[in-house]
Image: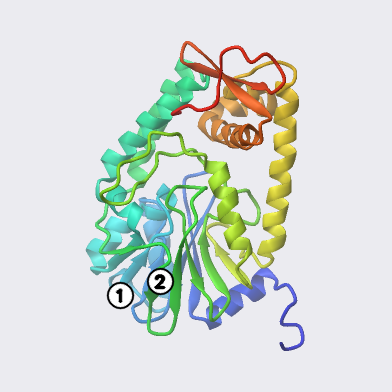
Amino acid sequence: MADGEDQQLTPEQARAEAVRAGIHELPIPTPFAVGRVNCYLIEDDPLTLVDVGPNSGKALDELEQALAQRGHRVEDLELIVLTHQHLDHIGLVDVLVRRSGADVAALDRLAGYLADYRGAAELDDEFAVALMNRHGIPADVVQALRAVSAAFRGWGSAVTVTRPLADGSALRLRDRTLQVQHRPGHSPSDTLFWDAERALLLGGDHLIKRISSNPLVSRPLPLPGEQPSLERPEALRDYMASLERTRALPARIVLAGHGDPVTEHVALIDERAAMTTRRERKILGLLQERPLTAYEIAQRMWGNVAVTQAFLTLSEVLGHLDLLRHAGSVHELESDGVVRFEASGSSQTGARTTAPL
């Protein structure tokens, strides 16, 4: 190993190394609180764009300008790769495909979702409404959030996936091979693309330096021909298992979906695991006082944010409750279709350990 090769790279050094590998970061504006989304142009054969930004005129304008700075047009794109199903990553895909004729590569589980994006979004909303009702979110808040979600659908779009990718398969370009690694948690379709030769990972939103990648409780995405599970996904448990797999990769650089590249992924993953443990302890302390719904826990922890971002905070709380429940530290109490959680060692009356939502 050359002197200094094992030292941490700065974000600028990481971007420069990616550029030498033919990968260019294109930050595209979004209307969301997360800010700009990083799309990545891979100058290879085929000319490839990883993620596309939201479906908006402003995003398209800036994407066209970013491509032009590299001497390319939208019409030159030959392959579009999608890391996961969220609006800021898929929104422009239909526009770009119609203009370029590019192939679309995405996880095989994501193909059906993208083919019927509007129908899938409606099923997502139905799933979310049932989940919020079951965990104590007031009806007026649920109704408002559903209306917001419906309004947001225009930021996404449908597309035919012409190259469905199986977990563990390889996406081969002329100058590189990207290993396809399904890492559910932040979303059911999170997909990493690992360049082992360069120790470089295209990570989507799986690992972001400045913010945690919220594991959202989402409707399961079965493989084609599979029946969807009726059990509520345990998004945080899935995410922690995915992070353990990512931790084992000898990655020098993780090109993230937002913000700077990650250059010390092991330390960041360990930091996120420690934060998860601290939050578990805080939630368990609240439940040792009295049984609470997940929504009541969210209000105790984040105040009014639990109203304005009710589904986000509900997902966060449920994820930690799943960890505590599997550890035997809490159990569920159900009454009139609403679930409360109680610290183990308290009254067991009415307790149950599993629930579809």
Foreground tag (2 vs 1)? 1
Q: Residue furthest bottom?
A: 2
Label 2 neighbour load within 10 Å: few <14, some 14-19, many 20+ = some
Does dot 2 land on a helix, a strand or a loop? helix
* Residue closer to the observer: 270 or 26: 270
Label 1 neighbour load within 10 Å: few <14, some 14-19, many 20+ = some
Tell me the amino acid under the disc marked 1: Asp
* Residue closer to the observer: 251 or 205: 251
Q: Give the residue at mark 1.
A: 76
Q: Is residue 155 left or right of residue 353?
A: left
Q: Residue 98: image x %, image y %?
A: 23, 62
How are the colours assigned in the image?
rainbow
Q: Is residue 124 left or right of residue 263?
A: left
Q: With respect to residue 317, does 39 lie above or below?
A: below
Does dot 1 land on a helix, a strand or a loop? helix
* Residue closer to the observer: 120 or 92: 120
Q: With respect to residue 22, does 40 lie above or below?
A: above
Label number found at residue 349? none
Q: Residue 152: image x %, image y %?
A: 38, 38
| Residue 212 visible | yes
Tell me the amino acid under the disc marked 2: Leu
Q: Earlier in the sequence, mark 2 or mark 1?
A: 2
Q: Residue at x 45, y 27 (%)?
A: 131
Asked whether the residues under the numbered discs 2 and 1 touch, taking CB atoms below 8 Å apart as contact, a structural biologist would say yes
Q: Residue 291: image x %, image y %?
A: 65, 17
Q: Give the residue at mark 2.
A: 67
Q: Quadrant of the N terminus?
A: bottom right
